[in-house]
């Protein structure tokens, strides 16, 4: 596996690959790799001739400097993991390499970046879009792989590709979970043993939502879940929303959309965790649902 730190060398390598007619699969990450990332890389390995991974902790998407400082950085371990799944090239730039000048680009995603994560992390998705756009320009992949755990981010990237007409196929990949249901995340490393023990409460409540979706009214189900988090002192619920998967707008009735997802963000002590669960996808007939 090649490890490259400069944009020019990366561009030179991938340009030669493209000229040979080989396909490039790309997995952008911020490091602290876990099984969820490795599943993306395995999928990329199956689909493409060359697999590229980037590790770059992007300061533009952190609106909390403490969160940026505490983000785990485990390059040596990450490198071993990348080799184990057959990654061909690791692009690991510095912040000055990625941003030699101040990034001033501002994207207009309409309401997509204003709700849920966007509401509580202003500027976050613009930072995501800036770095992903630059990475796509550097790597020029045929396919790029993103996990559905960051569902809103996935929607933003799909919109970015559409708006800027970037010639890349975005491949969504299912959430990878621990045996007890906790969604895999680099932030899980920051949980204490006791916090890690109770963290599956999040997925348990999401499963409860899935079981009752379409039977209980949306508003009542939402209130029920919110009250259960209020009853857990270790958790500080930031949001719990039931939304249309296409436009991320809240649904009031189960008949509002054929594609509905429940999304959640909560602090467990000082660690912010997000998760989601798809409730309906291409669900029909709509008239059978309870409003």
Image (spheres, helix red, strand yellow):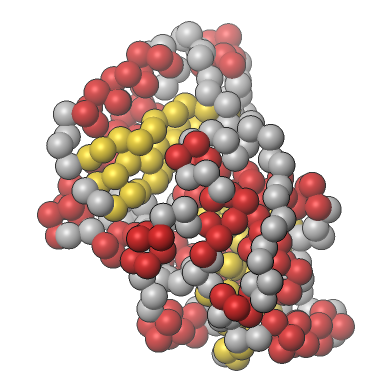
Q: Quadrant of the N terminus?
A: bottom right
Above or below — where is 40 with respect to 161?
below
Q: Is residue 234 left or right of residue 85?
A: left
Quarter location, residue 50:
bottom right
Query: What residue sits 71% from the left and 78% below the top?
Result: 49
Residue 152, how many percent across, how many down? 55, 43
Taking depth in this image into account, of 288 and 135 the one nearest to the observer is 135
Query: What residue sits 70% from the left and 50% below the top?
Result: 106
Taking depth in this image into account, of 265 and 261 the one nearest to the observer is 265
Quarter location, residue 2:
bottom right
Query: What residue sits 37% from the left and 21% below the top?
Result: 222
- Figure label count: 0
Residue 62, how many percent across, how many down? 48, 57
Query: What residue sits 53% from the left and 20% below the top?
Result: 251
Above or below — where is 24 with respect to 198?
below
Q: Is residue 229 left or right of residue 238?
A: left
Residue 161, how many percent across, how many down? 75, 52
Above or below — where is 77 with respect to 160?
below
């Amino acid at each position: 596996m090649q490890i490259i730190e400069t944009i020019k060398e990366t561009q030179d390598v991938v340009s030669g690959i493209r000229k040979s007619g080989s396909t490039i699969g790309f997995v952008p990450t911020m490091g602290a790799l876990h099984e969820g990332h490795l599943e993306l890389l395995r999928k990329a390995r199956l689909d493409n001739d060359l697999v590229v991974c980037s590790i770059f902790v992007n300061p533009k998407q952190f609106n909390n400097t403490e969160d940026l400082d505490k983000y785990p950085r485990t390059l040596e371990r990450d490198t071993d993991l990348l080799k184990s799944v057959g990654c061909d090239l690791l692009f690991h730039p510095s912040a000055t390499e990625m941003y030699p000048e101040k990034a001033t680009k501002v994207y207009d995603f309409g309401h997509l970046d204003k709700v849920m994560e966007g509401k509580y992390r202003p500027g976050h998705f613009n930072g995501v879009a800036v770095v992903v756009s630059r990475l796509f320009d550097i790597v020029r992949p045929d396919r790029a792989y993103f996990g559905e755990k960051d569902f809103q981010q996935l929607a933003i990237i799909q919109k970015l590709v559409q708006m800027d007409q970037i010639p890349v196929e975005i491949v969504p990949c299912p959430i990878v979970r621990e045996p007890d249901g906790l969604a895999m995340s680099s932030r899980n490393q920051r949980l204490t043993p006791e916090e890690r023990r109770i963290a599956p409460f999040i997925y348990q409540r999401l499963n409860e939502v899935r079981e009752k979706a379409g039977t209980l009214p949306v508003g009542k189900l939402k209130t029920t879940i919110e009250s259960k988090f209020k009853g857990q002192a270790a958790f500080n619920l930031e949001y719990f929303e039931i939304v249309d998967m296409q436009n991320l707008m809240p649904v009031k009735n189960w008949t509002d959309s054929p594609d509905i997802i429940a999304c959640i963000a909560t602090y467990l002590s000082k660690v912010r965790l997000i998760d989601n669960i798809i409730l309906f996808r291409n669900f029909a007939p709509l008239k059978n649902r309870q409003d």
